[in-house]
Amino acid sequence: EPEIPVEKKNILVVDDSGQMLRTILGWLEGKYNVRLANSAETAAVSINKDIPDLILLDYEMPEVSGPEFFVQLREKERTKDIPVIFLTAQNDADSVRAVLELRPQGYILKTTASTTLVEKLDDFFRKQNK
């Protein structure tokens, strides 16, 4: 039985660090369609053109922070259902609680190994398709 090719999911990665964007792009490209945005503003433009299947959103960003952008997305009809997973460098209990109170689809630590990140995303999409 030949496998039916699975439509590649579109992931938008939003992070103010160019290095982080390039790193994650390197981990995910090939398996996913990856678009990059280095600010909430750039991300909004990208989302207006094309709704992604998932947004990986940096928690700490200058100007508009991850949480602020997340709230903006949730307030709009067109973007309120886009799944968001936060990328955070903070692993302390208060930071994690603050992330989870927003009720995103999850959070991933920036120190996570590439294979773990990919597994988490694969898991996420697998559960979604059920």
Image (spheres, helix red, strand yellow):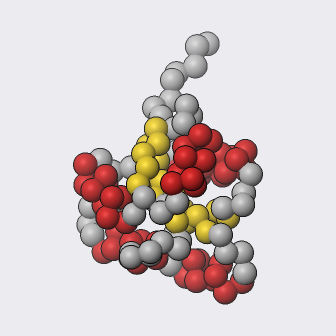
Q: Residue at coordinates 46% horizontally, 38% vertically from top-left? A: 33
Classify residue 109 as left or right of residue 65.
Answer: right
Q: Position of residue 64 (x, y in %)?
A: 39, 75
Q: Nearer the viewer, residue 81 or 92?
A: 92
Residue extending furthest bottom?
Answer: 94
Residue 7 % position (x, y): 45, 32
Residue appearing at x 42%, y 45% in the figure:
35
Q: Is residue 117 left or right of residue 127?
A: right
Q: Is residue 80 visible?
A: no
For this rendering, which residue is in front, 63 or 105? 63
Image height of 98 relative to 5, above or below: below
Please identify the quarter of the rendering in which residue 68 is found. Answer: bottom left
Q: Residue at x 65, y 78 (%)?
A: 96
- Whether residue 6 appears in this view of the structure is yes
- 117 versus 6 height, above or below: below
Number of marks drawn: 0
Q: Quadrant of the N terminus?
A: top right
Instruction: Identify the residue at image location x=67%, y=86%.
Output: 94
Residues 33 and 62: in front is 62
Residue 28 lies, in percent from the top left, at: 58, 41
